[in-house]
Image (cartoon, rainbow, N blue to C red):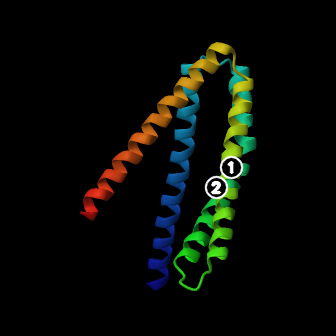
């Protein structure tokens, strides 16, 4: 009976994991198709864009991981009363370096994507980036307002 329960739990976890991976893939395909329509990409441009994203995916993933690790190390040091100011400055500089590498990876991806677009498409691409940044900023502001209200 114990083995059956364990097996059922394992099957449930596995099916949820596969469902999540499948949803991510479908979402990526939807984004790709939406980008194709909005920027009026040719088949060749779409293939190149997918290649760029695939090529840069691991680089950006590794950069995000380094930022996360550096941030955790910085916060751990900041929370330790025995950490010296010099050690804390070093951790902060390591965090800044990791963040700069992450931003550089995103910038390089953007440059490569821009290189396959014509002038009209680049203008649309930049407009989409502005809209995305505005949404992100609004989300951050809303989040900060929610946090501020919960503290009061």
Q: Residues within 10 Å of mark 2 (few under 14, many from 20)?
A: some
Q: Quadrant of residue 86?
A: bottom right
Query: Quadrant location of the C terminus?
Result: bottom left
Q: Is residue 85 left or right of residue 7?
A: right
Q: Residue furthest front?
A: 85
Q: Is residue 88 left or right of residue 134?
A: right
Query: Quadrant location of the N terminus?
Result: bottom left
Q: Residues within 10 Å of mark 1 (few under 14, many from 20)?
A: some
Which percent across, then down, holds residue 53?
69, 39
Q: Is residue 133 above or below residue 141?
A: above
Which percent across, then down, holds residue 104?
71, 45
Question: Tags 2 and 1 in contact by the CB under 8 Å rule?
Answer: yes
- Residue that appears at 62% across and 73% down: 88
As rendered, which of 65 and 34 lies closer to the eye?
65
- Residue that appears at 36% across and 51% down: 143
Q: Is residue 102 above or below residue 44?
A: below
Which disc is residue 96 wearing? none
The residue that mark 2 highlights is 64
Q: Quadrant of residue 99?
A: bottom right
- Residue that appears at 51% across and 46% down: 23
Q: Secondary structure at mark 2?
A: helix
Q: Is residue 41 above or below residue 144?
A: above
Which percent across, then down, holds residue 113?
70, 29
Which percent across, then down, holds residue 112?
74, 31
Q: Is residue 28 above or below residue 44?
A: below
- Number of marks present in the image shown: 2
> Distance of mark 2 from mark 1, alpha carbons?
6 Å
Q: Quadrant of residue 138?
A: top left
Q: Residue furthest top?
A: 120
The residue that mark 1 highlights is 60
Q: Secondary structure at mark 1?
A: helix
């Amino acid at each position: 009976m114990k083995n059956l329960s364990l097996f059922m739990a394992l099957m449930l976890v596995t099916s949820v994991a596969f469902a999540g991976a499948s949803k991510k893939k479908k979402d990526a395909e939807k984004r790709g198709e939406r980008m194709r329509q909005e920027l009026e990409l040719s088949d060749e441009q779409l293939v190149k864009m997918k290649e760029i994203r695939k090529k840069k995916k691991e680089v950006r993933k590794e950069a995000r991981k380094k930022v996360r690790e550096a941030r955790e190390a910085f916060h751990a040091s900041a929370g330790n009363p025995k950490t010296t100011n010099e050690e804390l400055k070093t951790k902060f500089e390591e965090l800044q370096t990791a963040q700069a590498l992450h931003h550089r990876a995103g910038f390089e991806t953007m440059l490569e994507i821009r290189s396959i677009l014509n002038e009209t498409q680049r203008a649309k691409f930049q407009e989409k980036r502005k809209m995305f940044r505005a949404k992100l900023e609004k989300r951050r502001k809303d989040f900060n307002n929610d946090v501020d209200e919960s503290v009061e």
